[in-house]
Image (spheres, helix red, strand yellow):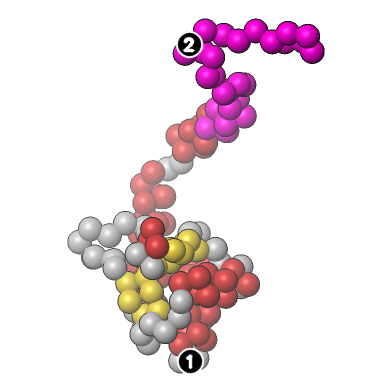
């Protein structure tokens, strides 16, 4: 390509978007290396303990609804708090350093990542504050 003339590829290469996502490929490789280095049994125990802690604590919150089924549960807690709009809930939790996803694609619910029982305790504290049962 020059200022005087541009030459296009033939189909289908004509529509190629450009440079491939090289940094994404390198990042994916690093993530795979990290995951392969984990003790999967220990990670599963940690995940189960976090989920047990979170579901037990969250179930005590007034007007809290969760769609977790004990027999099929995964390390994801979808929930709603009656009387609190999901986007308001997300904003308020964000102010306390807790990131969740909200919106229609998630059944008007929220879900987030808990890495420690401390994360779960902060989530519960904020939700209890919102519901007035401090």
Image: 5 above or below 108: above
Residue 1, visible in the rendered structure: yes
Mark 2 neighbour density, 10 Å: few (under 14) some (14–19) many (20 or more): few
* Residue assigned mark 2: 11
* Residue assigned mark 1: 132
The residue segment tinted magenta is: 1-28
- Tally the marks: 2
Quadrant where the image shows the N terminus? top right
Q: Quadrant of residue 22?
A: top right
Quote the CA–CA distance across marks 1 and 2: 63 Å
Q: Residue at x 48, y 11 (%)?
A: 11
Mark 1 neighbour density, 10 Å: few (under 14) some (14–19) many (20 or more): few
**Per the image, is 19 magenta?**
yes
Q: Position of residue 113 (x, y in %)?
A: 48, 59
Q: Position of residue 4 (x, y in %)?
A: 78, 9
Q: Residue at x 38, y 82 (%)?
A: 82
Q: Earlier in the sequence, mark 1 or mark 2?
A: 2
Viewer-nearest of labels 1 and 2?
2
Q: Position of residue 6 (x, y in %)?
A: 69, 10
Task: Report whether 42 appears left or right of 16.
Answer: left
Please state which of residues 96 and 3 is positioned toward the viewer in this rendering. Answer: 3
Q: Residue at x 45, y 34 (%)?
A: 36
Secondary structure category for the residue under label 2: loop
Please state which of residues 22 and 26 is positioned toward the viewer in this rendering. Answer: 22
Q: Quadrant of residue 27?
A: top right
Q: Residue at x 36, y 85 (%)?
A: 63
Q: Position of residue 98 (x, y in %)?
A: 56, 67
Image: 58 above or below 19: below
The label shown at residue 72 is none
Please state which of residues 98 and 32 is positioned toward the viewer in this rendering. Answer: 98
């Amino acid at each position: 390509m020059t200022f005087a003339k541009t030459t296009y590829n033939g189909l289908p290469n004509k529509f190629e978007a450009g440079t491939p996502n090289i940094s994404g490929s390198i990042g994916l490789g690093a993530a795979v290396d990290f995951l392969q280095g984990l003790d999967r049994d220990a990670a599963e125990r940690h995940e189960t303990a976090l989920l047990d802690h979170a579901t037990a604590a969250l179930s005590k919150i007034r007007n809290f609804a969760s769609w977790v089924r004990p027999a099929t549960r995964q390390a994801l807690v979808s929930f709603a708090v009656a009387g609190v709009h999901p986007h308001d809930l997300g904003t308020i939790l964000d102010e306390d350093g807790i990131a969740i996803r909200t919106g229609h694609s998630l059944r008007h619910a929220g879900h987030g990542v808990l890495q420690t029982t401390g994360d779960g305790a902060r989530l519960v504290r904020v939700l209890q504050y919102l519901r007035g049962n401090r």
